[in-house]
Amino acid sequence: MPATVPVRVRLAPSPTGTLHIGTARTAVFNWLFARHLGGAFLLRIEDTDRERSKPEFTENILDGLRWLGLTWDEEPVVQSARIEAHREAIKQLLESGHAYRCFASDAELAAMRERQQAEGRAPRYDNLHRDLSPEQQQAYIAEGREAVVRFRIDDGATITWNDLVRGEMRWAGSDLGGDMVIARRAPADAIGDPLYNLVVVVDDAAMAISHVIRGEDHIANTGKQLLLYAALGLTPPVFAHTPLILNQEGRKLSKRDGVTSVGDFRAMGYTAEALVNYMTLLGWSPPEGIGERFSLEQAAAVFSFERVNRAGARFDWDKLNWLNAQVLHGLAPDDLRQRLLPLWQARGWGEGTAADGAWQEDLCALLGPSLSLLADGVDQAAPFFTTPEPDEAALALRADAGSRAALTALLERLPEGPVDVETAQGLLAEAATAAGVKKGVLMKGLRAALLGSLKGPDLLTTWLLLHRLGSDRERITAAL
Ligand code: GLU
């Protein structure tokens, strides 16, 4: 391909389900490649399967891509709106003799497959209607039969291309399953619904796509599509087939693995930054110097297919969790608050009781460094928004005389107004001395009273946050 061809890539999702992690990863590689070369990243909604395509899936896919930061450059192309162009191309292939009408019935095709199976051969169309005479065609039409349109695939053909990931690729025409259906069954004077391989070629050419980057499960389609490009007199794009995402057992990640849609990861509390970072690592080895935690822009600056592996990429939850923790730990308290607020509000928190944004930011500053999932920011914030039920260890402490005496002494000294860290430290020391216990005893008792547990974030900060709500007095009193 001449160097002057502008780089234009596309993601071509079918809106027959929510945004799948595999599709999203394909989007990441397309986006990185386009941004690296200053090209355009486009979308095409492949909605030709009218029964299974739903507008809400299109919405879900676009939302997911937006959430991940995978911005696109032109209005998405809607495939179904281009059906006339697809029919034109089929007409052209019929006229040039590259395609023909096949009248074989379902029963005949099934019988053919059975025969092949019985003979131990791979199922394929036997090209039987390839050279029907006009009289034979008329006879089928008179019978009332409808016809599909098939594209001739020369068994002797060798299809080659230079794949950006897999290098020199070679495919035998005889391995493509016989003449391929490019339009569904319809009366012989019409053209039925155009099918995937034909439609993709016509659309990629019309959109001036320079590079087709997609999962390796499409490799056999690429063989067929290259034959279509040649028959239609179109220049094919460069192809890059990316490795599949595998589950822990090394099999292709599928719905059976549970979490597979981008929305699932989002709902589980993964950040877009971590997920997109992780997907980039699924099959791409970053060059030295950028480490494993990077932004899309940082990856785009150094992205190339030379560092995309051929082998499937095994999904690694530990790495995703690690990245997510890195992202969460690095968020400014205000940013974290913006992300947690909807989750808090879903629990009925964050409004009314402690609507004060500054207080919430301080809570985020306290919790941020210990979060791995956003959802942890709900669990860990719970004792700040509602009075926690004490656990066994906290209950046991309530019976401890030293701890009770120290808490009582603290309560007596607790001011109504604001308390700063220094004052708080002074109060703790005074109360412990007055009760005749070590400061540690009071600290333990205070934590149990405030949080209902002996575990939790930094005690002094926790106390001061609760003091701002006036809940420290309440909780200490309840523990005595
Ligand atoms: N609609 C196809 C899919 O979702 C697109 C394949 C392609 O990129 O050509 O798998």
Image (cartoon, helix red, strand yellow):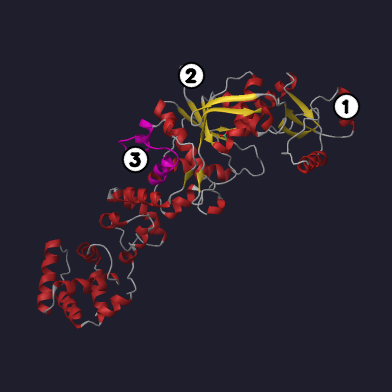
**Would you say the beta carbon of the disc 1 residue lies within 8 angstroms of ligand 1?**
no
Q: Within the magenta stretch, is there residue 283?
A: yes
User: Mark 1 and mark 3: span between their CA atoms?
Assistant: 64 Å
Which dot marks residue 136? 1
Q: Is residue 150 left or right of residue 307?
A: right
Seen at 65% across and 40% down, the residue is 49
Q: Which residue is mark 3?
A: 294
**Front-lying residue, 282 or 401:** 282
Residue 168, relative to residue 384: is it above or below? above
- Mark 2 is surrounded, within 10 Å at the Cα level, by few (under 14), some (14 to 19) or many (20 or more) other residues, namely few
Helix, strand or loop at mark 2: loop
Helix, strand or loop at mark 1: helix
User: Mark 2 and mark 3: span between their CA atoms?
Assistant: 30 Å
Q: Nearer the viewer, mark 2 or mark 1?
A: 1
**Front-lying residue, 199 or 383:** 199
Q: Within the magenta stretch, is there residue 323?
A: no
Q: Which is more N-terminal, label 1 or label 2?
A: 2
- Mark 3 is surrounded, within 10 Å at the Cα level, by few (under 14), some (14 to 19) or many (20 or more) other residues, namely some
For badge 1, the amino acid type reads Gln
Which dot marks residue 5? 2
